[in-house]
Image (cartoon, coloured by chain):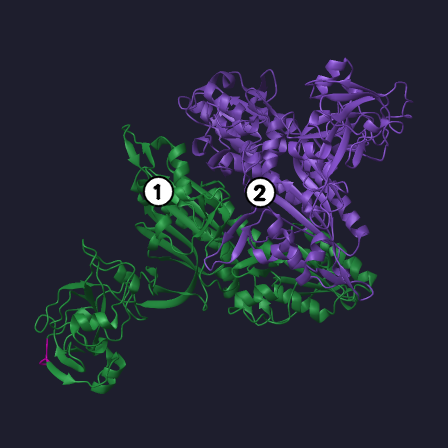
Chain colours: A green, B purple
Amino acid sequence: MRASRYLIATLKETPADAEIISHQLMLRAGMIRKLASGLYTWLPLGLRVLRKVERIVREEMDKSGAQEVLMPAIQPAELWQESGRWEQYGGELLRLNDRHGRDFCFGPTHEEVITDMIRNELKSYKELPANFYQIQTKFRDERRPRFGVMRAREFIMKDAYSFHIDKDSLDETYQVMHRTYCNIFDRLGLDYRPVQADSGAIGGSASHEFHVLASSGEDAIAFSTGGKYAANIEKAEAVAPAGERPAPSEDMKAVDTPNQRTIADIAAFLNVDATRTVKTLLVKGEADEEGKSSLVALILRGDHELNEIKAENLKGIAEPLTMATDEEIEAAVGCKAGSIGPVDISVPVIVDRSAAHLADFICGANKQDVHLTGVNWGRDVELGRVEDLRNIVEGDPSPEGDGHMEIKRGIEVGHIFKLGSKYSEAMNATVLDEHGKSAILEMGCYGIGVSRIVAAAIEQNHDERGILWPAAIAPFEVAVVTLNAHKSPTVMEAAEKLYDELRHAGLDVLLDDRNERPGVKFADMELVGIPHRIVVSDRGLGAGTLEYKGRSDADKQDIPVDEALPFLMKALSR
Amino acid sequence: MRASRYLIATLKETPADAEIISHQLMLRAGMIRKLASGLYTWLPLGLRVLRKVERIVREEMDKSGAQEVLMPAIQPAELWQESGRWEQYGGELLRLNDRHGRDFCFGPTHEEVITDMIRNELKSYKELPANFYQIQTKFRDERRPRFGVMRAREFIMKDAYSFHIDKDSLDETYQVMHRTYCNIFDRLGLDYRPVQADSGAIGGSASHEFHVLASSGEDAIAFSTGGKYAANIEKAEAVAPAGERPAPSEDMKAVDTPNQRTIADIAAFLNVDATRTVKTLLVKGEADEEGKSSLVALILRGDHELNEIKAENLKGIAEPLTMATDEEIEAAVGCKAGSIGPVDISVPVIVDRSAAHLADFICGANKQDVHLTGVNWGRDVELGRVEDLRNIVEGDPSPEGDGHMEIKRGIEVGHIFKLGSKYSEAMNATVLDEHGKSAILEMGCYGIGVSRIVAAAIEQNHDERGILWPAAIAPFEVAVVTLNAHKSPTVMEAAEKLYDELRHAGLDVLLDDRNERPGVKFADMELVGIPHRIVVSDRGLGAGTLEYKGRSDADKQDIPVDEALPFLMKALSR
């Protein structure tokens, strides 16, 4: 490609509304432009990257045995009503009417459509397992779209759906997809981690997320130092402290704690570490048959944080997790939130594993501005239900026993789920099993945020001058930059010759033949992030050399004109 | 690909609601499935064809120097209000609201979005010409979607938009796109014709359509036998008959024609050929300043048909063309439609070129159930405005003088337009010209119906057994069909070996290893339309041969096992 005939729409200024580095760099490098909130046009340079990501995803999905299909973006409401999601799905579902007033949505995902297709097409267990995927434009009407294509409303996703006669077959394909995802992210050249994840609203029994590691990531992900365990912090298990709970050594006493509301207040006031306190949170319980719900108390060690996902997944807790209001707390307990505690409380109690391990702890007395010290489970208050309620923290023991936990930030770019029979049951998707009986299908689903990967790759790979693309997804592999070519036919001729030579060897080359100052051209090529740069100049040619610089190199080097191709082939590991 | 692990969803019965052969065959061959009216899922086999079409379109567009971009499917109303199309575009524009109640549409085309992008990105004539394209899912909310993907609501289109400093540059790119389209349809292996076309509602000064010839085509297209002239019948010029108009030889007489209403009635009643009569049609004229419109009389030879597009493009005629009602006719002329004629009529008259060439003709007398015979222009009625008003018919002289006209049926699969400054003016898209002055851009736009091409190819290429794909877009080039492989390891082994050999040579092969009866497998491969079939059987292998049959061949032939690859390479012209 010749830059003189190509849209190199770089910007000097960082657009004001771009908060994160990938959004800033994609705008500055002329890869995307905003059309409206959460809607972006992919300019030629950006689209090249997107297509390279797409190609790698497609090739690896094909290798895995998955079959590519293409379902409509616009989906009829009837199918979503059948699965129950027409009502459940919130404002992110872009609902619309056609000219006849019929209800449709712009699909944010395709479980219903594929399940409908499969129940019509597949009749026998002999046709299973089968895995279908598509790479397609999807829409989620985010309340507050931001971060460019990282959290756009219209985006490109690879979604796959597998169908099985039983759970063993689903397990097998799930493992194949896990390996396929690793192959994809390996080929993309990204530093990523597969981690256990909560299955969330989409339902199902098991899931893993694939995260690109980047300090700007929205998710916290936890790893064991031994390498056996990795999970999203939403899901990561916080194990009970080792050993037996210490025996009581103090008597329980009430102390006045006027105006001390937070754990930090109490710890400072009583001059103890927060690890010796517990905090008590009141949340709504599951509604009873008459639709009424009472409150439930959650007890955590004072220095720990409630994990809301874990809490709302518990039996007896309302979903979504809903904190009790100040009025509800006072009505139920008789004091304000800062003074409640498990002793003699009038609502059911669930205790976190770490809180359950405390002896001689401090908690609210359920009396305004009074706390209890020296409290002990069993002696002063019954220890009933114990659950994993908290977020893990760095240094926690690994649930797999292999060392302790570390926490990093990640950007979710892939997610695989065992859906089980959630959709097949709701939509009656069956085949005949080997005994000729109708059997509900088991399903898996597997997503990759194709357009999001482009942004995630930048979050992970950039410096103060611009983007540092992994070679596999760089818009071009090599930039051949001419200096003063408009005045020097020798330079232009040598550059054209090199351009042809490299292209014919299969390299993806941008010839920067623009009539711009050298500084502008160098800055553009670095901003755009082309991994290898060759400069063709009169001075170099006079000495029979070209100037090479790798995008991350500190220094340039001269290479003989004839050795450019083998040099680059080696640099590109070809 | 192994058929045993691939969705071969062929149907024996022709689905009842599929009216045209391509729709029937795409359903029967398992290429598409209907999700809802005008919405189709592309199954794996169909998607392979679609992707091959896409690839050819992309490669040729890239070769032409066009740059690929990807614009959002969802477009903000503001841009359409700026161009004026938010109001003008009818029910086919799928309008919708996001969660904040803002107006958007699902783009049926992208003139507004690209013009907005260009006015922001391009500043100088030096950056021109530039041509941007995308291959993308579009939506037109057809009132009555039908014919499968031929006239679907959601469809895939290649749309391109070029930008120029002047008309000469637009002309140049227009010619490049014309050649590019010919290259595309040549490579697709389709019998097609570029024809002059009406520019229609999209606006602009010149346009050509590209039609795939097929007897089932919705459009009539006209060609000169000399090959110089080709046009959509909507546009094809009907030239005046050769020579001077004959001199009058009869006197004008009134004759009673009770209850004779149509031209056929009159011709039979008076025992003359319809070519000696004229018909008079009253249509609405353009509204005056007060919004009132009077009627206009259009005069055609009795055997000719009004061309509504030509009529509505004339100055003085209301757009869209609106026929006068019976009441309006009686009020204006004093008789019913069957008795009107040009002589002494009280409304302005426009005469078709052929009608203007008549002498001694017959027409209505503007008196109920009375006609005039022996009418002559100039003598009995003034011949004022003469225009081209009619559809051409086979045998008409060519407007280019090269023989006469023939008419065929075509399916429109491509359309190129000179838009001129319609959008750039409305949206103020300018650059600085060489004198540093702001200049409105000239624009061209260029569409190809990517998904429609798949259906059009089938309309043109099928027989009673199924589809006859052109090699370039067949889902697979070769089918290797095993006979009784489940009982014969020899057959399976030989088939696997051949499959590997052909694939490694770069052929696109489907190994039909399904445990089905030979008849079922042969019928499926013919229905699906795979161009070349090799059968591997115990009997053949015993004699050292494989059985070959081309999809259109009458007979099979045996080829030695070792010669299969060179034989197929030759058959595929590789």
Q: Measured from the top left, where is residue A302 in percent x and y? A: 24, 75
- Dot 2 falls on which chain? B
Q: Measured from the top left, where is residue B417 in percent x and y? A: 72, 45
Question: Given this view, does label 1 or label 2 mark the residue nearer the observer?
Answer: 1
B144 over A42 or under it: above or below:
above
Q: CA distance from mark 1 to mark 2?
A: 28 Å
Instruction: Give the residue displayed 63% in from the left and 51% down from the top.
Output: B85
The magenta-colored residue range is: A248-252
Query: According to the image, label 2 marks what residue?
Result: B156
Crowd class of label 1 (few under 14; some 14 to 19; many from 20; radius 10 Å):
some
- Dot 1 falls on which chain? A
Instruction: Give the residue displayed 75% in from the left and 34% down from the top.
Output: B297
Give me the disc on residue A484. Answer: none
Give me the disc on residue A82. Answer: 1
SS assignment at label 2: strand
A85 over B558 or under it: above or below:
below
SS assignment at label 1: helix
Crowd class of label 2 (few under 14; some 14 to 19; many from 20; radius 10 Å):
many
Q: Nearer the viewer, residue B337 or B321?
A: B337
User: In this view of the protein, can residue A569 be seen by the observer?
Assistant: no
Q: Nearer the viewer, residue B498 or A336?
A: A336
Q: Amino acid at mark 2?
A: Ile
* Corner quadrant of residue A565: bottom right
Q: Measured from the top left, where is residue B510 in percent x and y? A: 51, 31
- Asked if residue B459 lies left or right of residue B541, the reply is right
A284 over A179 or under it: above or below:
below
In the rendered image, residue A260 lying in the magenta stretch gets the answer: no
- Asked if residue B373 lies left or right of residue B69, the reply is right
The quadrant the N terminus of chain A occupies is bottom right
| Dominant SS in magenta | loop
- Asked if residue A226 lies left or right of residue A260, the reply is right
User: In this view of the protein, can residue A7 be seen by the observer?
Assistant: yes
